[in-house]
Image (tube, rainbow, N blue to C red):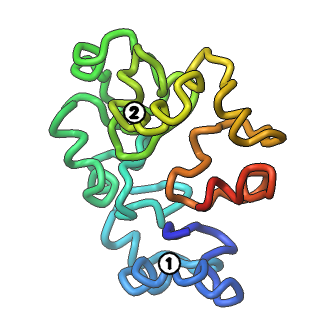
């Protein structure tokens, strides 16, 4: 799916997550399923995250990943942090709250990250996920936070997924999303 997943996915048996972990494994050759991650720990001393493969994967991961110890998520959060300098691990996000007042989300780095997120992120209070959901909302104007998704349900009858914004978002989402009823994840 283009993202290096962790644990058993990043193993020889799973072909290094279908090839998605090759770049990460070249950088940290001892940080895959069953290995000790010594090279990663040398590069990021004090960075104790559950999934090291999220560090430097091209997506800003909030919480402990967006910390000095983890190199601001291996550099993935630098742009976000330049916009909201106090919205990292241990910060209070006052600059984010001043910019987008009323947007109360668990992970502010998802706002404006280029991917339409669901629930409260796709709301007027959060500026339609910082603009990320505009395309989805044009296609399905009644399928945002607090709406009934009638247009989506008409397009995909029988597709009963928790997060409709993941359908047709450019990433293949498995499970119920990748089904005939959901148009094989909207073609993803």
Report x, y in % for residue 102.
38, 9
The furthest residue to the left = 82
Please tell me whether residue 10 is drawn above or below residue 139 in the rendered image.
below
Number of other residues with Cα within 10 Å of mark 1, as a class: few under 14, some 14 to 19, many 20 or more: many
Number of other residues with Cα within 10 Å of mark 2, as a class: few under 14, some 14 to 19, many 20 or more: some
Q: Quadrant of residue 95?
A: top left
Of the pair 186 and 124, the residue shown nearer to us: 186
Quadrant, the N terminus: bottom right
Of the pair 92 and 152, the residue shown nearer to us: 152
What number is the disc on residue 21?
1
What number is the disc on residue 158?
none
Q: Is residue 134 left or right of residue 158?
A: left
Quadrant, the C terminus: bottom right
Report x, y in % for residue 160.
79, 38
Please tell me whether residue 183 is drawn above or below residue 102 in the rendered image.
below
Q: Is residue 108 left or right of residue 16?
A: left
Report x, y in % for residue 135.
42, 39
Q: Is residue 4 left or right of residue 175?
A: left
- Name the residue at 39% across, 86% down: 26
Give the secondary structure at mark 1. loop
Report x, y in % for residue 33.
63, 77
Which residue in the protein does label 2 denote?
134
- Name the residue at 47% across, 27% down: 121
- Name the residue at 29% across, 17% down: 100
Mark positioned earlier in the residue sequence (1 or 2): 1
Q: Quadrant of residue 27?
A: bottom left
Please tell me whether residue 77 is drawn above or below residue 41 in the rendered image.
above
């Amino acid at each position: 799916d283009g993202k290096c997943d962790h644990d058993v996915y990043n193993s020889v048996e799973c072909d290094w997550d279908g090839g998605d972990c090759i770049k990460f494994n070249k950088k940290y050759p001892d940080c895959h399923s069953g290995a000790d991650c010594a090279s990663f720990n040398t590069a990021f001393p004090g960075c104790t995250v559950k999934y090291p493969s999220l560090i430097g994967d091209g997506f800003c991961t909030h919480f402990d990943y967006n910390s000095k110890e983890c190199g601001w998520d291996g550099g993935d959060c630098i742009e976000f942090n330049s916009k909201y300098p106090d919205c990292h691990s241990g910060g209070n996000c006052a600059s984010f709250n001043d910019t987008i007042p009323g947007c109360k989300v668990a992970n502010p780095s998802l706002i404006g990250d280029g991917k339409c997120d669901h629930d409260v992120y796709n709301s007027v209070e959060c500026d339609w996920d910082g603009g990320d959901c505009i395309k989805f909302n044009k296609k399905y104007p009644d399928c945002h936070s607090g709406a009934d998704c009638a247009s989506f349900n008409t397009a995909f009858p029988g597709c009963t997924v928790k997060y409709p914004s993941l359908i047709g978002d450019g990433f293949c989402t498995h499970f119920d999303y990748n089904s005939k009823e959901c148009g094989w994840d909207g073609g993803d």
